[in-house]
Every structure is written in structure tokens, then in C-alpha cells.
Image (spheres, helix red, strand yellow):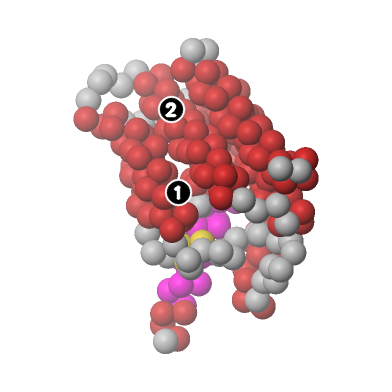
Amino acid sequence: MSVKKNIPNAITSLNLVCGVIGIIFTLSQHKPEIAFYFMLAAVAFDFLDGFAARMLGAYSEMGKELDSLADMVSFGVLPSMMMLETYASGGHGLSIIWAAPILIAVFSALRLAKFNVDERQHESFIGLPTPSAALICGSLCALSASEGLGWIGESIWLIPAISLALCYLLVCEMPMFSFKFGKEIEADTVTKMLRYALLSIAAIVAVLVLFFGLPWPAIILGIFLVYILENALFQLLSAKND
């Protein structure tokens, strides 16, 4: 196999490495806020491997499987452990509620398996993509570690409730637009409008976070919550028009 064909797989492997390091910082160092940086790096590599594969025409079945395995670690196990560690650091005793963050890993696996066999998801998504769910978890955990925001982990219901909501969104049938681009990918007008709307709102969110002096992970959390709301609102409007 040529070097060009292996470039996307090498980038995917860096995604996996970041996920593993993030898990180490979460479980052994109890530093989910540091693990969040490695999650962000994993997201960057996850975007770049797909972009490289499209630009180089370097698709392969091995690459597809490797991508899912890397995503399972970085965007399934890592956010699950980060949420669990943040919840545990809040002083909550062991109970059935602890299962909620763990379920993120399970439903991420279901989401990835569904994505691999669903022919409807070549240029858009059905259900919340695992990187988006992971970034919501990661930013929330990073915020909890910030001064004055420890109540996020101390709340007995917040992290379990968000975990269960994300589990549902990962496997639901709600269409969601993507930011995929490259050779042979051309977004339709509606998708472009949704993307521009999200980018505009993201800029507003960033300004508000900076204005109120909130920690920067609030920007990422806000953007992906808006992403979910925007897709949900669009589907509701589309259903009414039908």
C-alpha cells in the first residue's frame, strides 16, 4: 500500500492516542479538565483524517474500521469516564445513578455501529454524532473544574440527566447536518443556511461568554447545545410544513 493511502490511517491513529492519554489523565490523575484538551486534539484529528481521505481519494475498509475504533475510545469511553469522574468528585455515594455516565460509552458504540451500516449518513447524520456528544461532556466537565462552577459535579441530577439525554440523542432518528466537505461533496442550500446560522450564533455565544467572564469551555458547550436545538427546531418546522 502506498504512503498516500496510509496518511488518513496515521491521522486516525493520532485520534486514538489522544483518547487513550485523555483516559489516563481522567482516571489516574483525576484531571478531566486536562483530558479535555486531548479530546479537542482527537476531534481535530478525526476531522483531518476524513478530509485527507476525501482529498487524497484514500478510502479503505480498514480505514473505516480504524476510524470507528478510535472514535469509540476518544468519543465514547473518554467522555463517559470524564462524566463519571466529575460526578464522583462531587461527593456522591455509589448508587444506580452512577450507571448514567457509563451508558454514554454503550450508546456511543451503538451510534458508531449504526453509522457504519446506515446508507443514509454519507453526507449528513441521523442522530447526534459521537464527537458532538463527547464535546458536550468534555466542556461540561472542564467547566465543573473551574472556580465557582463545582456545583455542576456536586448536583445529584445534572450529570446523570445530561448523560441520559445524550444517550437518546446518539441513537435517535433526528437528521442533523454535518460540516463535511471535500471532493465530490456539495452541500445543498438548506444545509449551507443551517451552517451559516450556527456559525453566526457561535460568534454571538463566544462574545457573550467573554463579556460575562465565563471559562472558555462554555463557548464549546454553548455551540453544541445550539447545534442540537437548531436541528431540532428545523425538524419541527419541516414537520409542520409537511
Is 29 situated above or below 183? above
Question: Hey, what amino acid is under mark 1?
Answer: Leu
Q: Quick one: which residue is furthest to the left in this view?
A: 96
- Per the image, label 2 sits on a secondary structure element best described as helix
56 within the magenta span: no
Q: Which mark is residue 43?
A: none
Q: Which residue is drawn at 25% across and 20% down?
A: 94
Q: Estimate how packed mark 1 is, as few (under 14), some (14 to 19) or many (20 or more) residues with alpha carbons within 10 Å.
A: many
Say what amino acid the circle numbered 2 marks. Met
Residue range in magenta is: 222-237
Residue that appears at 62% across and 71% down: 191
Residue at label 1?
112
- Are discs 1 and 2 less than 8 Å apart at CB? no
Main secondary structure along the magenta-highlighted residues: helix
Dot 1 or dot 2, earlier in sequence: 2
Residue that protrudes farthest toward the front in the picture: 1
Q: How far apart are marks 1 and 2 (CA)?
A: 18 Å
Instruction: Say which residue label 2 marks.
Output: 81
Report the side of 40 relative to 30 (left or right): right
Is 30 on the left-hand or right-hand side of 212? Answer: left
> Which residue is located at x 63 percent, y 33 percent?
13
- Residue 153 point in image, percent of width and height: 42, 28
Q: Is residue 229 covered in magenta? A: yes
Residue at the spot 56% in from the left edge and 50% down from the top edge: 61
Q: Residue 234, image x and y in percent?
A: 50, 72
Residue 122 x %, y %: 56, 64
Q: Which of marks 1 and 2 is in front?
A: 1
For the question of whether residue 66 can be seen, the reply is yes
Find numbered disc 1 in the image and state the secondary structure of the residue it sits on: helix
